[in-house]
Image: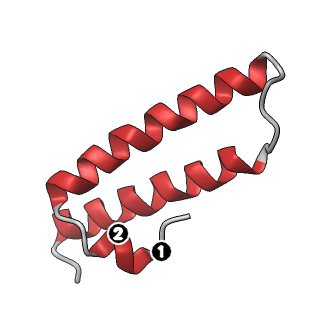
Amino acid sequence: MMKIKEIRALSTTELKEKQYLLIEELFHLRRKQAVGQLENGKEITRVRKDIARVYTILRERELGIN
């Protein structure tokens, strides 16, 4: 799980790259879950929350908040 301070320290370009990697990771986790190979289902929740955090910071920067 990424801390919000860690996310805020990244540049916008790094955030977009991180967003892409997290979405890709979520895709792979869902594939594993579909075939029954996923051992820890909470990983999906963790990745989804990280994606939401990244989206939030990107949106804040668009609006000029913080």
| Amino acid type of the residue tagged 2 in the rendering | Ile
> Which numbered disc covers residue 31?
none
Q: Secondary structure at mark 2?
A: helix
- x, y percent for residue 21: 39, 40
Relative placement, left or right, of 22 versus 8 is right
Q: Residue at x 79, y 25 (%)?
A: 37
Q: Secondary structure at mark 1?
A: loop
- x, y percent for residue 28: 58, 27
- x, y percent for residue 51: 47, 52
| Amino acid type of the residue tagged 1 in the rendering | Lys
Placement of the N terminus among the 4 image quadrants? bottom right
> Relative to the observer, which residue lies in front, 55 or 42?
42
- x, y percent for residue 55: 37, 56
**As drawn, 60 above or below 49:** below
Q: Residue at x 38, y 63 (%)?
A: 56
Q: Disc 1 designates what residue?
A: 3
* Circle 2 Cα neighbour tier, 10 Å, few/some/many (<14 / 14–19 / ≥20): some
Relative placement, left or right, of 48 versus 16 is right
**As drawn, 65 above or below 60:** below
- Tell me how many marks there are: 2
**As drawn, 38 above or below 32:** below
Callout 1–callout 2 Cβ contact below 8 Å: yes
Instruction: Determine the CA span between mark 1 and mark 2.
Output: 6 Å
Relative placement, left or right, of 15 versus 37 is left
Q: Residue at x 29, y 74 (%)?
A: 8
Q: Disc 2 designates what residue?
A: 7
Placement of the C terminus among the 4 image quadrants? bottom left
